[in-house]
Amino acid sequence: MIEALTAELKQECAITRRLLERLPDDKFGWKPHEKSMTMGRLATHIAETPSWTVETFAKDVLDFDPADFKPSTAANRAELLAAFDKNVAAALEALQAQQDAILATTWTMSVSGNVVFKETRAVVLRVFIFSHMIHHRGQLSVYLRLNDIPVPSIYGPSADEPNL
């Protein structure tokens, strides 16, 4: 399982990086709606997501305190890609250091002491980390389209990359 999850993480992060590489520095403050994140904040959130793999194996419970949370936004594409690459490397190292048995053990996330979810680490990796990154990557592809920035192929051709 660790080997399969590692391969999946590598594949999804390669796709994600292709999307992040398209962000122009002058669009980091753009957002499609007042309730939406800016392009830079959304991209930074995506870049942070792989690092959650480290926490998933480092501790059994993560108690998130919203009062202490200060969202960051990369200043530009170079900073964003450097952070993403660092987080992906740390995630892969943490994942590859594990044995399959740990995937069946429970991990808990709480907010200010209130349990939000309690799942096996396998579910946490697939849903809370991988699918979460993929979900936001989809949002970012729409941000790119709305700004006439070519969207890379993701799981197949895109309108901008019809030939794989």
Image (cartoon, helix red, strand yellow):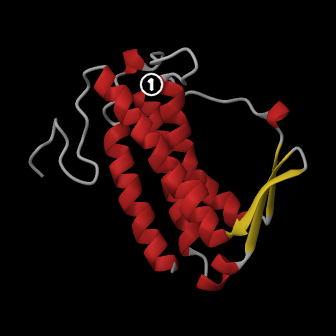
Q: Position of residue 58 (x, y in %)?
A: 73, 64
**Residue 154 placement, left or right of 128:** left
- Name the quadrant containing residue 71: top right
- The kind of residue on which mark 1 rests is Asn
Q: Is 41 placed left or right of 60 in the picture?
A: left
Seen from the viewer's position, the closer of residues 80 and 34 is 34
Q: Residue at x 50, y 17 (%)?
A: 33
Residue at image position (23%, 46%) is 153
Q: Is residue 74 visible?
A: no
**Residue 10 visible in rendering:** yes
Callout 1 environment at 10 Å: few (<14), some (14 to 19), or many (20+)?
A: some
Q: Position of residue 25 (x, y in %)?
A: 39, 20
Quarter of the view holding residue 19:
top left
Residue in the foreground of this view, choosing between 76 and 107: 107
Can you give x and y, in whole percent of width and height, for residue 100 in the image?
Answer: 59, 83
Residue lying at 68% horizontally and 62% vertically, measured from the top left: 56
Residue placed under numbered mark 1 in the picture = 76
5 lies left or right of 25:
right
Residue 119: give x, y in percent of width and height: 71, 67
Q: 108 left or right of 163?
A: right
The residue shown at (39%, 56%) is 12
- Farthest residue, direction left: 163
In the displayed structure, 43 sits above or below 107; it is: above
